[in-house]
Amino acid sequence: MLLEIKDIHVHYGKIAAIKGISLEVRQGEIVSLIGANGAGKTTTLKTISGLRPLTSGQVLFDGQDISRMPGNKRVEIGIGQAPEGRGVFPGMTVQENLLMGAYTRKDDLSADLAEVYELFPRLAERKTQFGGTMSGGEQQMIAIGRALMTKPKVLLLDEPSMGLAPMLIAQIFEIIKEINKRGTTVLLVEQNAQQALKLSDRAYVLETGRVVKSAPGPELLHDPQVRAAYLGGH
Ligand code: ATP
């Protein structure tokens, strides 16, 4: 087991956003969290990466309780996150943005940089272009590439397909599959449930801060309730 969340509760002020979520991610898996707006998907990822404190419960990584560990330490032990909204530095070049992901590393970065450019040829073509002038899809590539530069054991992806044209969505999902094939475990939050479930070994359905269902991705694709609620009922 790489990542284990045990009965976490998270509040924003007095409002309970997460009301007792438990989930597991095994080494090598792609796991998705799906659910309506406000279900608590982003908050769950932020709790794992240390951007939100939990009120109670535990986050275990590689068997270690990291519930109170600062976010920067979590990056060092192998938790990488590409945040929702991307967070690309607009006044830095593509390459500088990627290198920011690795600023705590002291080892040689050239092989990892080359791998990111191999996964995202578009970024290789535009190394010196400012991040802020890249398109939405390209900025998404930067955000994922930057997270990969931390050499994560698990990559947390928050809505990687958001705002992208259909062709780019397909591309991003292909790249996620490839990243996983090369050995990185993936925990994915997606509104695009259809694509996410197709790609996922397992998925959890969240509703108002709770897990209401979990099963292998392809199984949920055929679940009538999931189809009605998240897949447009087709
Ligand atoms: P979406 O798909 O819309 O991003 P989500 O499933 O990721 O939704 P969260 O963003 O985790 O949901 O939000 C869970 C709940 O917490 C929501 O009710 C939301 O309004 C609330 N919430 C999130 N961020 C804050 C915040 N900074 N302050 C107060 N409430 C918040």
Image (tube, rainbow, N blue to C red):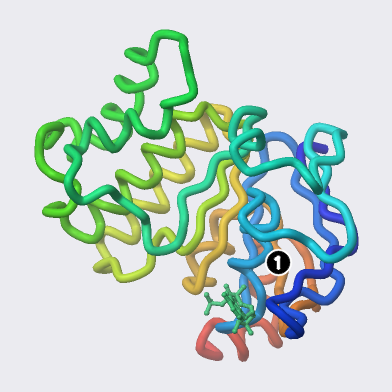
Give ligand 1's quarter of the image: bottom right
Q: Look at 75% across and 75% down and name the residue there.
A: 11
Q: Is residue 51 above or below residue 76?
A: below
Which image quadrant is residue 222 in? bottom right
Indicate the position of residue 89 as horizontal and vertical percent values: 27, 48
Q: Look at 48% across and 43% down and name the residue there.
A: 177
Q: Amino acid at mark 1?
A: Glu
Q: Look at 31% across and 47% down and name the residue there.
A: 141
* Image-based side of 87 in relation to 42, left or right: left
- Furthest toward the front, the residue is 13
Q: Look at 75% across and 47% down and name the residue there.
A: 25
Badge 1 element? helix
* Image-based side of 90 in relation to 26, left or right: left
The residue identified by callout 1 is 219
Along the line of sight, the residue nearer the viewer: 92 or 214 = 92
Identify the image quadrant of the N terminus.
top right
Q: Is residue 15 above or below residue 90?
A: below
* Image-based side of 98 in relation to 76, left or right: left
Indicate the position of residue 18 as horizontal and vertical percent values: 76, 74
Indicate the position of residue 234 as horizontal and vertical percent values: 52, 87
Q: Is residue 30 above or below residue 19?
A: above
Which image quadrant is residue 114 in? top left
Indicate the position of residue 192 as horizontal and vertical percent values: 47, 71
Along the line of sight, the residue nearer the viewer: 155 or 172 = 155
Which image quadrant is residue 212 in? bottom right
Q: In this figure, what is the number of numbered marks?
A: 1
* Image-based side of 224 in relation to 84, left or right: right
